[in-house]
Image (tube, helix red, strand yellow):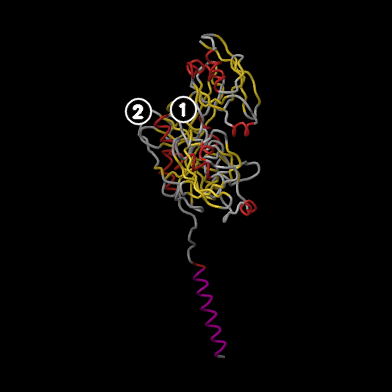
Amino acid sequence: MMLKRFYSIGLTFILFVVGSVISLPAKSSYPDFTELVEKVQPSIVSIQVDVIRWGRVAGRAGGSGFIIDDEGYILTNHHVIDNGDTVTVKLYNGREFKAEVIGSDANTDVALLKIEPGKQDLKALKLGTSDVLKVGEWVLAFGAPFNLEQTVTAGIVSAKGRGEVGSQYVPFIQTDVAINRGNSGGPLVNLEGEVVGINSMVFNPMISSGLSFSIPIDLANNIREQLLETGVVNRGYLGVMFSSIDQDRADAFGLKEVSGSLVRRILPGSAAEAAGLQEGDVVIAVDGKPVRKAQDLPYYVGQKMPGDTVKLDVIRNGKEITVNAVLTDSSGRTASINGGQDKLGIRVQVLREDLQEAYGIRHGVVVSDVMEQSPAAQAGIQNGDIIQKLHQTPIRTLEDYQRALASLPEKGKVALLVARPGRGSDFFVIKLD
């Protein structure tokens, strides 16, 4: 009898405890974003880009951006404003301003704009740092997907240092935040309201979801500073082609870890050749920073300036050595000789061997800059075009291009044979006044 009573009291106690636990209010596992959104949204802008042909709007595109100071400077993506003739910025309150493109960099997909706000008060976002951003951390994306202005989505950081998904100069931040067309150029913000990235692209939405990529703000801020100072971006160039390291290669090259960047080709006349790098070398560190993935090598080098010396820790024949390399200009030599820039409105650079291999095009010069409203711009010439013939002169080298420039008439029409990687080639006609 006493035993039954004991069990009865015990069971009642257990049920009471369980019931008490169940009745406790559930603690939310999601943060409240409302105050953060209210704080950030006034700094978000929508961007409209118009392409003008023969005095009419021939094309229109758009994206997002964000204000970074009260003077009217705005960060966005290069691809948002690329090839546009006019750029219009729309603020949170609906006011619109014409924007000047201070500069942009296709390799990192960063562009800097400027508006003249007059008496309009602007609210700038604080730039944080992506270096301390952790995988699993909450982040929010702001922008105007499909022209739906002031849209915000939330998610977490899925990975960092994704250099294999886009430009070799950008170690992308991967998130599961919903990003769609029109979000490009908007900020990726942490829970402190600081910008940690610029939304740039989404992985093929036809085959996957939850794979979005943003440019680290530390990299974007470096680009911003260069664009603000000179309007262009210079970066160091080593002159190697490289491959990744897997377990088999690590074993074959005597590596302790499955990491590093395997040099498979040294480009002639490059900084790498001058420094004595060899094919088969495995670069494991740049200025003390470990090269864990092959894509780390061009990223670290690209953070340096032409003329800088970098210390490369290299595994060669199973032994670790140090190689010091003086970096060259990442874009090669630039030509605008004999008034060529004045006549055509373009600058060109050599077609490097790595670009020849990537594009499958063996001769020509690459257009690196097109001046707004220039004869070349009006003819449809774009950055990245490869000029293979100018005014009946075949173009194989910069010297060929310079000779062709010198032979151009003061007035009239000249034809250029232009190759566009992945699109074939065609003749463009430039009118000289």
Magenta residues (range): 2-21
Q: Secondary structure at mark 2?
A: loop
**Amino acid marked by disc 2:** Gly
- Residue at 61 percent across and 53 percent down: it is 250
Residue 151 in percent (x, y) is at: 50, 40
Cα gap from disc 1 to disc 2, whole angstroms: 16 Å
Main SS of residues in magenta: helix
Q: Is residue 217 above or below residue 253?
A: above
Q: Is residue 104 above or below residue 278?
A: above
Residue wearing tag 2: 118
Residue wearing tag 1: 88
- Residue 97 in which image quadrant: top left
**Image check: 166 left or right of 197?**
right
- Residue at 52 percent across and 8 percent down: it is 411
- Residue 164 in which image quadrant: top right
Does residue 69 show up?
Answer: yes
Residue 17 is a magenta residue: yes
Residue 265 versus residue 76: which sits nearer the camera? 265
Residue 397 versus residue 232: which sits nearer the camera? 397
Q: Is residue 413 above or below residue 11?
A: above
**Amino acid marked by disc 1:** Thr
Q: Could you tell me which quadrant the N terminus lies in?
A: bottom right
Q: Residues within 10 Å of mark 1 (few under 14, many from 20)?
A: some
Q: Is residue 315 above or below residue 429?
A: below
- Residue at 40 percent across and 41 percent down: it is 125
Residue 21 in percent (x, y) is at: 50, 69
- Residue at 56 percent across and 49 percent down: it is 316
Q: Secondary structure at mark 1?
A: strand
How many numbered markers are drawn?
2
Q: Residues within 10 Å of mark 2 (few under 14, many from 20)?
A: few
**Image check: 211 left or right of 44?**
right
Residue 238 versus residue 212: which sits nearer the camera? 238
